[in-house]
Image (spheres, rainbow, N blue to C red):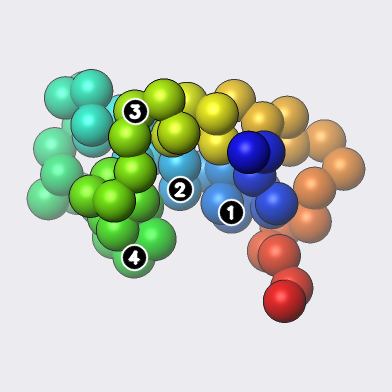
Amino acid sequence: MPAKSKAQQKAAGAALSAKRGDTPKSKLKGASKSMADSMSEKQLEELASTKRKGKPEHAGD
């Protein structure tokens, strides 16, 4: 499942970093905090590895 926006891709990267132990979970805020709790490492890898080119900064619903 690719990220729909640059913001989602960045949040997934931060959550993945915390899940792997590279960043303390206490440093996470907002979406990245909930992503770290609710998603598996594999799901986060898929979102974080999405290319940013052509993506909007924020996804509009």
SS assignment at label 2: helix
Q: Name the residue type under label 1.
A: Ala
Q: Residue at x 23, y 23 (%)?
A: 20
Of label 1 and label 4, which has the lower sequence position? Answer: 1
CA–CA distance between discs 1 and 4?
A: 11 Å
Q: Are marks 4 and 2 in contact (CB under 8 Å)?
A: yes
User: 10 Å neighbourhood of mark 2: few (<14), some, or many (≥20)?
Assistant: many
Q: Name the residue type under label 3.
A: Glu
Of label 1 and label 3, which has the lower sequence position? Answer: 1
Q: Are marks 2 and 1 in contact (CB under 8 Å)?
A: yes
The image shows residue 6 at horizontal and vertical percentages of 66, 48
User: 10 Å neighbourhood of mark 1: few (<14), some, or many (≥20)?
Assistant: some
SS assignment at label 4: helix
Count all numbered tags in the image, as a single digit. Answer: 4
CA–CA distance between discs 2 and 1?
A: 6 Å
Write down the residue under mark 1. 7
Write down the residue under mark 3. 41
Instruction: Left or right? Give the position of 37 relative to 51.
Output: left
Q: Quadrant of residue 9?
A: top right
CA–CA distance between discs 4 and 2?
A: 9 Å
The image shows residue 57 at horizontal and vertical percentages of 71, 57
SS assignment at label 3: helix
Quarter of the image that includes the N terminus: top right
Q: Name the residue type under label 2.
A: Ala
Write down the residue under mark 2. 11
Q: Tell me the mark number nearer the camera, choosing from 3 and 4.
A: 3
CA–CA distance between discs 1 and 3?
A: 18 Å
Of label 4 and label 2, which has the lower sequence position? Answer: 2
User: Could you say which disc has been placed on residue 29 in the image?
Assistant: none
Write down the residue under mark 4. 30
